[in-house]
Image (cartoon, grey):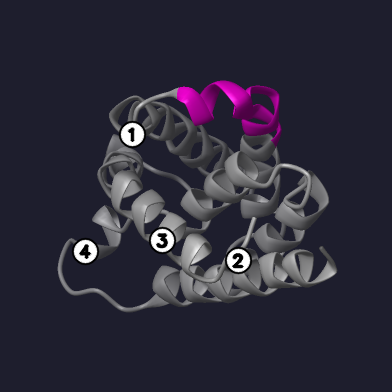
Amino acid sequence: MIEAVWGNRWMMLASVLLALLLAVYPLPGVGPWMRPEFVVLLAIYWVMVLPQAAGPGLIWLVGLFQDVVEGAVLGQHAFALVVIAYICQLSYQRLRNYALWQQAGLVFVLVGIHQLLGNWVYSLSGGTSKSLLFLLPAFTSALCWPLLVVGMNRLRFHYRLL
């Protein structure tokens, strides 16, 4: 049992590091506006799959690392991720039972909430956003959700993790 817990932790750490790398990978043209929120997607996935291991404290640390890596206002992503993790922990049993396309719809809403909270904190620090383009990553994240779930589930089952 202890090996499974450590395997879960290593898999979570590796996936979060990959998501942080994808979050700062340079994209040409309109790519940055369309980039899926990989860190948020993984936070939703890990809270849905292992709610006892992916608590708000761990998600808050991941958000702080995302703030540092992206150069955002310290606490911007951490606050938004904790809110999303809390919502997911309240309803993770329902989320598991939905079909992938229904989960993708909920992911669209959750990532949209994350984007709105992040934009709100950004505007409190003096920044401005003149359009609703900051919500485009919610759409692309919802499109990526089924691929992420299938890929992560295959990895978990291949390595026999919980």
Contact check, label 4 and label 3, Cβ < 8 Å: no
Residue bearing mark 1: 100
The front one of 71 and 6 is 6
Circle 3: residue type: Arg
Front: mark 4 or 3: 3
The front one of 113 and 142 is 142
Residue bearing mark 2: 66
- Badge 2: residue crowd in 10 Å (few <14, some 14–19, many ≥20): many
Disc number for residue 120: none
- Looking at marks 1 and 2 on the same chain, the residue that comes earlier in the sequence is marked by 2
Magenta residue span: 86-97
Front: mark 1 or 3: 3
Tag 3's secondary structure? helix
Front: mark 1 or 4: 1
Residue bearing mark 4: 31
| Residue shown at the point (84%, 68%) measured from the top left | 2
Tag 2's secondary structure? helix
Contact check, label 1 and label 4, Cβ < 8 Å: no
Magenta-span inclusion, residue 123: no
Front: mark 1 or 2: 1
Residue bearing mark 3: 154
